Amino acid sequence: MKKSLKFFIFFALLCLIAYVIYGLMKNDFSLEEFIIGIWNEHVETWGYVILFCWSILEGELGLIFAGLAAHDGKMSVALAIFVAGLGGFVGDQIYFYIGRYNKSYIQKKLHSQRRKFAVAHLLLQKFGWPIIFIQRYMYGFRTIIPMSIGITRYSAKKFALINLISAWVWAAITILLAWYFGDLIQSFLKWAKEHWYLAALLIVSFLSLLLFGFKQMEKAILKKKERKK
């Protein structure tokens, strides 16, 4: 029953995303002009501050915007990477110290996301410190893994150093890709406006595939643990 309810909620959210995209396109809303308008108005004055705060939340969308702004000459690529990396570093440090010192919050998280914490613990045992690099690209585990590391006796100084390097690598990869493929991204946004139905289908399919992939990974890791018992 719970699985059916979760599937229904997920399907409803996907339909809502598709409907919102349809509504925006139908009302002659230009996603490209909207993005460019935001950066034209704020990027040269508050761009780096916005990027830093956005990166604390660990959203690639902010890094992509920064890459596009750098592509248009409104931001420095090197400075954008530096600022975004610091923001990503601060975000994970917050989650690490929540795991280390906020036991009441962790208990609530363990109750609601016990399965993810179990997977995170197994990943830590298998990969060790490289998981700090990997977790930034793992949807659903970005907050869980730093908190899981915080729960353990892992060195805070060692975590901070690896976290800082991994945050700069994460920022560099995303921003440089958006900067280099800026023209292609902008062309895709124009195409998405003209073919909103295909864009909505692509987004829904990508999200579904992403969630399905990580769910299968969780199941495979937990099954492997059960076999070893």
Image (cartoon, helix red, strand yellow):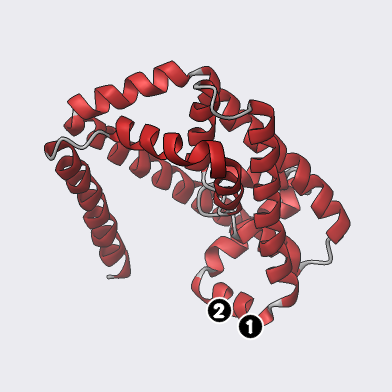
The answer to whether residue 8 is left or right of residue 206 is left
Q: Give the amino acid at mark 2.
A: Lys
**Label 1, on which residue?**
104
User: Disc 1 on helix, strand or loop?
Assistant: helix
Q: Which residue is located at x 16 percent, y 41 percent?
A: 22
Q: Amino acid at mark 1?
A: Ser
Kindly identify the residue that appears in the image at 71 percent across and 63 percent down. Answer: 96
Q: Which mark is residue 108?
A: 2
Furthest toward the left, the residue is 26
Rendered view: 195 above or below 22: above
Q: Which residue is most to the bottom?
A: 104
CB under 8 Å between callouts 1 and 2? yes
Name above or below for residue 3 compared with residue 133: below
- Does 49 sit left or right of 21 as displayed? right
x then y, percent, for residue 41: 43, 39
Quarter of the image where the C terminus is located:
bottom right
**Residue 184, image quadrant:** top left
